[in-house]
Amino acid sequence: MTDYPDHLKYTKDHEWAERTGGKRVRVGVTDFAQKQLGDLVFVDVTTVGRDVEAGEPFGTLESVKSVSELYAPVSGRVVTVNPELEGDPEHINNDPYGDGWIVEIDVADTGALDGLLDAKQYEKHITDDEG
């Protein structure tokens, strides 16, 4: 079974969120998601300064298999896009919880993270979907 770090929060759409301080939340996709997509070739995300709404698309991941939408786990304003992904989207495949993060969002409400899944709930969600 894949490891899901306990300090992260997860969505049913396979994004993770990590509060990095203040109102800042770092967002990426889970190891499960990157494995399902396969080798990533392109990442397209909303621009810095744009507002995003929880549950709404904020970009896409393109792999050799397909294109998949990215959904914001929280509402807020995108303040940083991972510059490493522009020329090397494989960071997501190689290190989805580290160097493969996608955006940072200044959230409107930090309490919104409490509504996301914890690692055990996410793992159960994955197991239920596969079974």
Image (tube, helix red, strand yellow):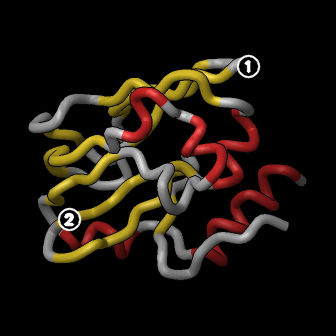
Q: Position of residue 21 (x, y in %)?
A: 21, 76
Q: Name the residue rendered at 67%, 18% in the picture.
A: 66
Examine the rendered structure and indicate whether residue 25 appears above or below residue 121.
above
Query: What secondary structure is marked by label 2?
Result: strand
Q: Which residue bears the numbered disc 2? A: 24
| Quarter placement of the N terminus | bottom right
- The residue most toward the bottom is 6
Examine the rendered structure and indicate whether residue 18 appears above or below residue 105.
below
The amino acid at mark 1 is Lys
> How crowded is the residue under tag 2: few (<14 C-alpha within 10 Å), some, or many (20+)?
many
Q: Position of residue 68 (x, y in %)?
A: 56, 26
Q: Position of residue 120 (x, y in %)?
A: 66, 77
87 to the left or right of 95? left
> How crowded is the residue under tag 1: few (<14 C-alpha within 10 Å), some, or many (20+)?
few
Are the two marked residues, 2 and 1, in contact with CB atoms closer than 8 angstroms?
no
Q: Name the residue rendered at 12%, 59% in the picture.
A: 108
| Quarter placement of the C terminus | bottom right
Q: Name the residue rendered at 50%, 61% in the picture.
A: 98
Q: Name the residue rendered at 48%, 72% in the picture.
A: 8
Q: Nearer the viewer, residue 28 or 12?
A: 28
First in sequence: mark 2 or mark 1? 2
**Quarter of the view holding residue 86:** top left
Measure the alpha-carbon separation of dots 2 and 1: 32 Å
113 to the left or right of 67? left
Examine the rendered structure and indicate whether residue 53 appears above or below residue 37.
below
Q: Which residue bears the numbered disc 1? A: 65
